[in-house]
Amino acid sequence: MPYEPNHPVFTLPQGEDQTIWRYIDLAKLVSLLKDRALYLSRADLLGDPFEGSTTRLVVESRRVEFDEMGNPEFFELLSEVNRDTRLDTYVNCWHLSPHESAAMWSQYAKQGVGVALKSTAPRLIHTLTDQLLHVPQLVYVGEVHYIDFTGDWIPENNLFWPYVHKRKSFEHEKELRIVAHVFPDYDGGVDPSALHPEGIAVPIEPDTLISDIYVAPETGEWFREIVQATAERFGLQRQVKQSSLDDDPVY
């Protein structure tokens, strides 16, 4: 089964109804519905230079260990291998929260054309399990842990560990991420530029994945109607909602 539920690196949130959100612009919504797929970005293109890196404590411990073994050259070799995994690792990010997030609207959905897809972790796992039965690529889902990249420790017994750890300054993202590692096919005269694509598509069933769609705060009714028409055009029968951040206060 291509979705792997029992990997030691990837842990799912506790509870059956863990709500997740994906904040995107309208173009990405159209792409998701048209292609019936989630887009996983290559790790080195996610915008955080620390993606795939380890902590300074780990590096210093590694340096001492290889020096004591009399193989200091292995230190640089291992660092190079770990750095190169970013070119073969692909990620799709969701926000774990029972409520909408003003910060996430601002950060990930363009003002005036943003939408938020609401789902749950079980819905995500369900669609990945169903849609990936005949796809050879393994896909994993797990929570991100937020740590101090100076003094904390990341395990070194699996190359996936760095991809479920981020700096504490990103803790507000409360991220649940889909991760896949694509091994390049160097045979058959493949164009080298095609060995590390900028992203990969993972098939999903939108009706299974998406429970609700919200449009960004301060967008007009015209935009909600456009998103509603877009959803219906691709067969997704959901009533598109205005962000709850636009609710009127009471005194």
Image: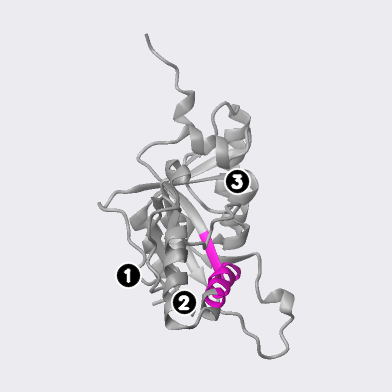
On the image, numbered disc 3 is attached to which residue? 230
Q: For mark 1, give the secondary structure.
A: loop
- For marks 1 and 2 on the same chain, the one whose residue lies earlier in the sequence: 1
Q: Mark 1 is on which residue type?
A: Pro
Which region of the structure is painted magenta? 76-91
From what the image shows, is residue 33 above or below residue 195? above
Question: Which numbered tag is attached to residue 8?
Answer: 1
Check disc 3: other Cα within 10 Å, few if <14, some if 14-19, many if 20+. Answer: some
What residue is at 43 percent from the left and 36 percent from the top? 100
The percent position of residue 45, horizontal first and vertical second, equals 63, 58
Residue 194's x, y, as percent? 70, 75
Query: For the view shown, which residue lies furthest in the left direction?
Result: 15
How far apart marks 1 and 2 lie (CA) works out to 30 Å
Q: Which quadrant is the C terminus positioned in?
A: top left
Determine the secondary structure under disc 3. Answer: helix
Q: In which quarter of the image is residue 207?
A: bottom left
Which amino acid does the dot numbered 3 rest on? Answer: Thr
Residue beneath disc 2: 67
Q: Are the residues flagged by discs 3 and 2 in contact, CB closer than 8 Å?
A: no
Which one is closest to the eye, mark 3 or mark 2?
A: 2
Q: Give the dominant element type of the magenta stretch: helix, strand or loop.
A: helix
**Labels 3 & 1 near each other (Cβ < 8 A):** no
Q: Which badge, 3 or 1, comes first in the chain's sequence?
A: 1
